[in-house]
Image (cartoon, grey):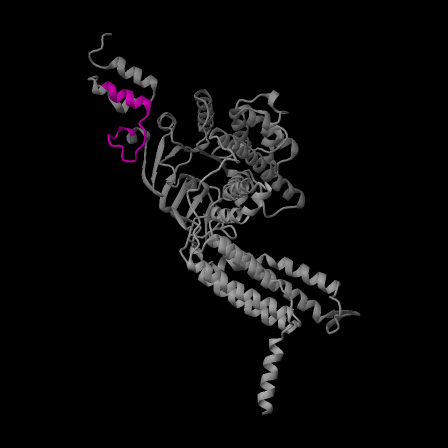
Amino acid sequence: MPIKYENVSFTYNAKTPFSYEALSSVNLEILDGSFTAIVGKTGCGKSTLIQQLNGLLVPTSGEVIINDYVVAKSRKRRTKKIKELRKLVGLVFQFPEYQLFEETVEKDVAFGPKNFGASNEGALKSAHEALRLVGLDESFYKRSPFDLSGGERRRVAIAGILALNPNILVLDEPTAGLDPRGAREMMALFKGLHDNGTTVILVTHDMNIVLEYSDTVIVMEDGEVREITTPLELFNKENDRYSLETPLLYKFVKSLSDKGMALDIRMIKDIDSLAAAIALAPGNKR
Amino acid sequence: MKSLSLGRYAPFNSLVHRLDPRSKLLILVLMMVAVFYGYSSQVMTFVMGGILLLIIFVMLLVSRVSLRQLFSSLKALWIMIIILLLINVLVPPLGASRIAFSVGTYHIFWESILQSAKIILRLVMMISLTLILTATTKPLDLTYALEWYMYPLKLIKFPTHEIAMTISIALRFIPTLLDETMRIMNAQASRGVDFEHGKVKEKIKAILSLIVPLFMSAFQRSEELANAMEARGYNPRAKRTRYRNLHWGGGDTFSLLLATILTAGVILTSVMNWNYVEMIFNITTWSVGL
């Protein structure tokens, strides 16, 4: 069952002088097993949009449907067991390393599963599995999360969500502030999870990531969904209406085309396909 | 941020908003004094309380404080009311004699109930007054006013500027830390923490999962701020000028005068043991007698 937003609007501080409409009549559908990127300028409502996925924010009007769960204002419609929804949808906030609080890494990661009713051993088992996934070995288990480096802390925090085994993983700029290598490893981790059937929803400003990993892109502007498309289509359009940065790969391809190399841009998605296209380009000596 | 915090500055342009923070602060102090004066009889206490409440209500309307916000903050007073009643019932005020009702052999006096009502009335007025000040004055302006009032203390080498700086930094970080609290609460809620329900042990754990990260980030922020101030060459002892100057106008003098007259009247009534109720009563009986 896909995720569905039906006419979702959201206003912060409604009926006060600070009232601010962050989302207005959003309609969209996210398919099961997709890797969806949500892009748009800061303050366009991306974070508000994803916080409705596990009921942290409830739409001022309209409703969000996730499998059989409904997030809506109406008491009749909305799901009572919000906790089950939170287990289904793992939400990783921006800079999640600030949510760590336990004495040891393994205890912190096991905190989530325990909240959802796992036994001590069961929670630790999920914690160890999640830590393995994010690439932290046994030597980290008994360390204090506050002694780790920023990147390691981020991994621990993400493991804290992965330990819940969510079917839908929502990530708010998971690579922000990481060094390039750390960011690559992080994205490889999410790709691996996606290949194993997890639906991944990713908020990001990095268009290289959008091009390389996502299969669907949702473009947002001023609290509205402007476009739901594929990365290839989005970046192939010449105009930069949404003032999105062009991915490096495409800048290179466009520069090559401008200099007279005939390339079929539709065939290019990564370095390999670019290399293949260049090798095949007419006029190249073989 | 989900909910408005109590007493947050509301950017309107009312009469009260335009007053100088110094006059507002002084008026608040005067009115507080007026609110806390006692009178010769219980009846007088409530008559004067009623008059003050009415004045404060008008002030609330003029300053465009959201009454909804006020009532929602007064809702939290229920616990106070119950505790106060309990204390006053268990330890009746001196000279309590009139029995309201009895539970078995235990008497509950009218004086206990009136005493609690008096304290509640004062609390309500105090909260409303403070709300008027904070809702109509930018925190930074308030700090400037405080610093201005502390000026004489400079002569005895009292670090007024440092204190004003500390207060303004503290005020500046209240919304930031509130946002941070919301952020961490959301993050932990995503990990299945339930801040509202659950057993005591689970609740303690839930609070812990909020407090520890909050302290961590607060310490980190303060360290970063200290570094940023150092880097800009901040020196608390340096003589400095200000971008915004406070401006005392005719309205300030006038409002202050009104508040002074009101407070003086209240003090006089209290000290002279005037009893308006009896006076009016006497006049009417006297005229009826004629």
Give the residues drawn in magenta, as a range.
A235-256
Magenta highlight on residue B82: no
Judging depth in this view, the residue of B23 and B136 nearest the camera is B23
Please tell me whether residue A98 is drawn above or below residue A182 in the rendered image.
below
Left or right of residue A271: residue A143: right
Please tell me whether residue B130 is drawn above or below residue A88 in the rendered image.
below
**Residue most toward the right?**
B105
Tell me if I can see residue A134 in this picture: yes
Q: Which quadrant holds residue B159?
A: top right
Residue B25 drawn at (x, y percent): 52, 54
Magenta highlight on residue A244: yes
Residue B287 drawn at (x, y percent): 57, 88
Left or right of residue B45: residue A19: left
Tell me if I can see residue A161 in this picture: no
Judging depth in this view, the residue of A209 and B60 nearest the camera is B60
Residue at 50% from the left image edge and 38% from the top image edge: A88
